[in-house]
Amino acid sequence: MKFSALVAIVNDEYEEQTIKAARKHGATGITILAGKGIPCDERKTFFGLSFEGSQSVLIMVLEKSLSLGVLKAIKNVVAKNEGGSEGLVFTVPLEHLAGIDFKQVQRFEQHLKEEL
């Protein structure tokens, strides 16, 4: 079985929606880190101070064939129609992996069987 790491960086208000979409499409364990984003265009707020938004970084280890479906589901949560976005999501192939829970592997297998 091959694995990918999926990383989603989303604005805090989209964290729960992102988790629900990822779980619905086969993600099991998710690690969440707090982050602070700095946009490419500096936004001015009260008294000329710049705004740096709070973000959540979600990291998931997925069976490789599940990763594209989870990525697309998260994209549907964070992508705006106007071309903007409330987050970023990408996958990275994993060559070596240790410590994954066997129950998680069984859930991946079950999800794949249900899709077929």
Image (cartoon, rainbow, N blue to C red):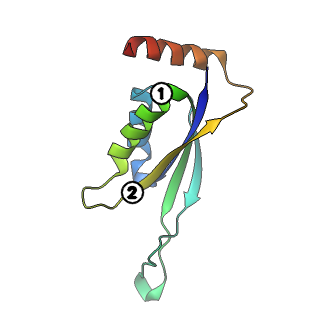
Whether residue 28 is visible here, answered yes or no, is: no
Q: Which of the two marks, 1 or 2, is nearer to us in this view?
A: 1
Number of numbered labels in the structure image: 2
User: Which quadrant holds residue 115?
Assistant: top left
Q: Residues within 10 Å of mark 1 (few under 14, many from 20)?
A: some
Given residues 66 and 19, the one toward you in this image is: 66
Which amino acid does the dot numbered 2 rest on?
Glu
Residue sticking out furthest to the bottom: 47
Residue 37 image position (x, y, % from top left)? 52, 64
Instruction: Name which residue lies at 42% across and 78% down.
Output: 43
Which amino acid does the dot numbered 1 rest on?
Leu
State which quarter of the image contains the N terminus.
top right
Which labelled disc corresponds to residue 83?
none
- Left or right position of 33 against 80: right
User: Which quadrant holds residue 19?
Assistant: top left
User: Which quadrant holds residue 36?
Assistant: bottom right
Given residues 89 and 48, the one toward you in this image is: 89
Instruction: Identify whether 94 is placed above or below 77.
Output: above
Whether residue 114 is visible here, answered yes or no, is: yes
Instruction: Name which residue lies at 44% across and 29% down.
Output: 23
Residue 86 image position (x, y, % from top left)? 39, 57
Judging from the image, what secondary structure is the residue with disc 1 in? helix
Residue that mark 2 sits on: 86
Q: Residues within 10 Å of mark 2 (few under 14, many from 20)?
A: some
Residue 113 image position (x, y, % from top left)? 44, 11
Instruction: Name which residue lies at 45% across and 88% down.
Output: 48
Instruction: Name which residue lies at 42% across and 41% down.
Output: 18
> N-terminal of the two: label 1 or label 2?
1
Residue 27 image position (x, y, % from top left)? 49, 29
Q: CA distance from mark 1 to mark 2?
A: 23 Å
Judging from the image, what secondary structure is the residue with disc 2 in? loop
Residue that mark 1 sits on: 66
